[in-house]
Image (cartoon, rainbow, N blue to C red):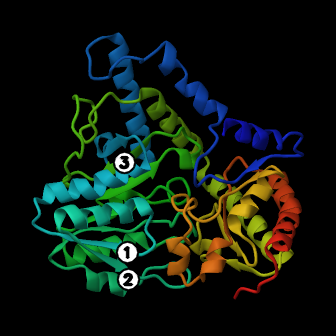
Amino acid sequence: MIENVEELIKAHEKLEREVYLDIENSSPVPEEVVEAMLPYFTTRGYGNPALTHKPGWEAYEAIMKAAQKIAKYAGAKTPEEIAFTPGETEANNLALIGAALASKAKRKKIVVSEIEPVTILHVAKMLEEKFGCKTVKIPVDAEGFINLENLEEAVDKETLIVSIAAVNPEIGTIQPIKEAAEIVKTRNPNTVFHTDFSDAYGKMKLDFSKTDIDLATISSYKILGPRGVGALYVKQGTKIEKIIEGQIATQKFWPGIENTPLIVGFAKASELTFTDLDKNIGHMRRLRDKLMNGLLSRVSDTLLNGPSGDKRAPDNVNISFLRCEGEALTIELSLKGVYVSSGSACTRRLLQPSHVLTAIGRRFEAAHGSILMKVTRLHTEEDIAYVLKVFPEAVQRIRKIVGSTVVS
């Protein structure tokens, strides 16, 4: 098996250029972030932050400063509202399961959109099976937007938690999240409102303290930070309980020894992202449109998945290439130095279409021909020009292989 991988890697030698657009699944870490983390592996703050000695105090100081920084960028009132977790998945689990444990089974209704990340949908299903909860899924339109009237009808006195992602990670739809939270709280002030904010953090402005949002998940690697760390914003007064047991830690909701280097890296990535935020967002939006419009105009038989313009996240491009198998296209593009993904990160190795694309009305074949790409503040005009150069050739080659069956 390792020999096959070595052959695949060797096939990528002497590439003209490499452009990594698979930020949905992982990301490179800039040197500034790595440099910020390095001392905490070797010379500073390598101790347990819960213990009373110099390396422990240094670790504690670093974690508290990181929480202060992220709280400022998220609009939290205090750093105590930032609970670090090992990642986005763990934060989403903490939000839903933690709320269920805190409710003592008094309320059992969960409301989500039908295009929520699978980390939300799977947890909701587990709560149905083990806690007797009931999940209500709000449908979306052809661009992935929820209907606020449907949301209002779904929330009642039995509703435990509502979870709506601020930005859909696959098709970039920016939901009216502030309005959704207001509706939920008007219908039932005791209902917990959670949003997976991972694809919105650093891509849009929202001050959590000025909204009715109770819980919000944010991720490190989606802003070019290290993998293995994320956070859950927990508004003061929101009732959730920890979901795992372990030794005492500085983190109230996640026991165990904190990963100080990664938390420091998360804070540094946040700093780089939010410095000149408007400039960074504008840069991503220009590259997004150049890539999106360029592919739609250069390649025939394509479908844009999700909305366009200001209704779409500034980094997100998702296009279905009809008569083209998505996984095969990712391999062909990889051999040209362009790295993308097909379908959503959590379903790409399964022989089933993305639940997000089928929810917005895409047929099986169109969903399987989808390619997801995300630009960052570090991408350049030259990167996008190179992608537009090699992409049509890759599509043409795959279409010749799979045949010419027309898909609509």
The spot of residue 244 in percent (x, y) is 24, 42
Q: Quadrant of residue 388?
A: bottom right
Is 187 placed left or right of 390 in the picture?
A: left
Question: Residue at the spot x=56%, y=67% of the render?
Answer: 351
Q: Which residue is tagged 3?
A: 90
Q: Amino acid at mark 3?
A: Glu
Residues at circles 1 and 2 in contact by the CB criterion of under 8 Å: yes
Q: Residues within 10 Å of mark 2 (few under 14, many from 20)?
A: some
Residue 306: assigned label: none
Mark 1 → mark 3, Cα distance in angstroms? 26 Å
Report if residue 212 is visible in the image.
no
Mark 2 → mark 3, Cα distance in angstroms? 28 Å
Residue 148: assigned label: 2
Question: Residue at the spot x=48%, y=37% of the render?
Answer: 267
Q: Amino acid at mark 2?
A: Leu
Residue 179: assigned label: 1
